[in-house]
Amino acid sequence: MTFNIGLGVTGGIAAYKAVEVLRLLQKAGCDVTVAMTRHATEFVQPLTFRALTDRHVIVDDYDPANPDPIAHINFSQNIDLLLIVPATANIIAKFANGVADDFLSSTYLATTAPVIIAPAMNVTMWEQPATQRNVEQLRADGVHFVDPVAGELACKTVGTGKLEDVENIVSQALRLLNAKTQRGKDAKADLAGEKLLITVGGTREAIDPVRFISNHSSGKMGFALAAAAADRAASVTVVAGVTTVEPPSNVNVIRAVSAEQMHEAVMKELPSATIFVGAAAVADYAPANAADAKIKKEGRDTMTLELKKTPDILADVSRNRHDGLMVVGFAAETNDVVGYARSKMEKKGLDIVVANDITKEGAGFNTDTNIATIITHTTETELPLISKRELGDRILDEVIRLRQGQSITN
Ligand code: PMT
């Protein structure tokens, strides 16, 4: 299959390496059209790319030499991938903030194709909080990065900022395109007939009518998974605790504040579910005796709360599972992440456990991204930083893979 790739070149010293990327993509059978920012043309002449592609190289939509009067629209809608090599801090900032003041940034806004960015810049520019914020924003928007590597930079300093090897950039681009084609072939109605029941968000355990014990869960992970499942034609019910984001519009939402209420709602819905996912951060303990009236602080320098264990929803689901129910749990850990997750999988009788290290930047609570390992009894898939939506899809892929195994052995 021939892939149409839009190669965007921006103004950094590594711009000359984009020529090699172009050659390697062509060798792999890709059809490449090149767009350059004006600053990129200070480093490499558009003629170089024109000679190699036999096509006009777009720098400016409004250039009278440009054969296409609305080039950014046509260009953006006829590519399977937008690949930016090298990407400067400036183009990353524009993409992250929706600025569209030149051909390449307008193309980014106008495309629905996946985007891969391979940055290259001075180490201080790369490590600037502003650049890192923009990178984080783009990752959350679903943009893929081929991160820069450490080495000696053009400015003679040593640090992270060097463009990754061109072979690695090209192989990551091809891998993404091939995976996308495969998913396209599998047409996303692959969860039709499945009924997902998902716990989402955090619980609140009342101390008195004013105070409670809770945690940092926003609901982003559970809702992203719910949206992914609904988009793949599953019927989805979420039992949501306290969340700070809105649920997707195409799922059924049941609210439950405490662990006790969440347990009750789950058990009621369980008989009709075919897949259960415990993505909620359920409080493990709740005050043994919540006060009916506000507890007064007068005359108390310290206060002791007696806590009692909450029902373990996930373990109860697994214990009461009916034939064919697939049970997926999460494990939020801070150390020996995979080890603890595996032991939860055994203790709670899970088919899959998703281990996330909540100490890692971009992972865990209240982020749009996560870093996780998907563990089954026979496999362990370590994933890089990806959006929670993409992680949702990867978990569902694993569920389907196990289902297929079940139907082969049955
Ligand atoms: O909501 P976000 O801000 O997006 O954050 C996502 C997340 C960090 C909450 C999510 O990725 C996650 O890890 N969820 C599980 C958090 C957790 O409580 O993990 P745990 O290791 O304490 O519990 C293990 C499993 O048992 C979980 O599936 C949990 O839902 C379940 N459990 C725990 C206790 C309990 N009483 N009942 C349960 O069902």
Image (spheres, grey):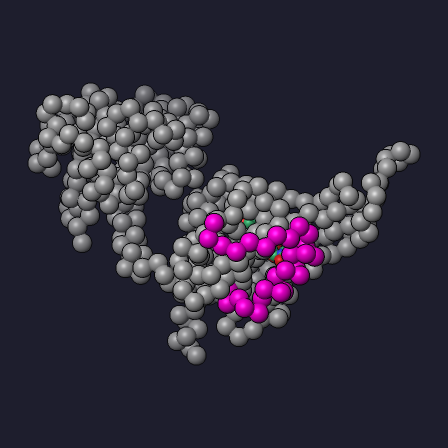
The residue lying at 52 percent from left, 48 percent from top is 247
Q: Is residue 138 above or below residue 265?
A: above
Residue lying furthest bottom: 410
Q: Where is residue 338 drawn, in percent x and y?
A: 53, 54
Q: Nearer the viewer, residue 230 or 351?
A: 230
Image quadrant where residue 24 sits: top left
Q: Quadrant of the N terminus?
A: bottom left
The vertical placement of 234 against 203, above or below, is: below
Quarter holding the C terminus?
bottom left
| As drawn, 405 above or below 392 | below
| Residue closer to the observer: 348 or 323 | 323
Q: Is residue 332 visible?
A: no
Q: Is residue 368 magenta?
A: no
As for residue 254 lying within the magenta part, the answer is yes
Give the x, y percent position of residue 5: 21, 42
Q: Is residue 65 above or below residue 345?
A: above
Residue 194 shown left or right of residue 39 in the figure: right
Residue 169 placement (x, y as % from top left): 28, 41
The segment highlighted magenta reads: 249-275
Q: In this orientation, does residue 406 appear?
A: yes
Say which quarter of the image contains residue 72: top left
Q: Nearer the viewer, residue 29 or 258?
A: 258
Question: In the picture provided, is 407 more to the left or to the right than 106?
Answer: right
Q: How many numbered marks, from 0 up?
A: 0
Q: Residue at x 41, y 27 (%)?
A: 131
Residue 19 location, x and y as percent?
18, 34
**Residue at (41% x, 49% y) in the render:** 390
The residue drawn where x is 48% and y is 45% is 370
Residue most extreme to the right = 299
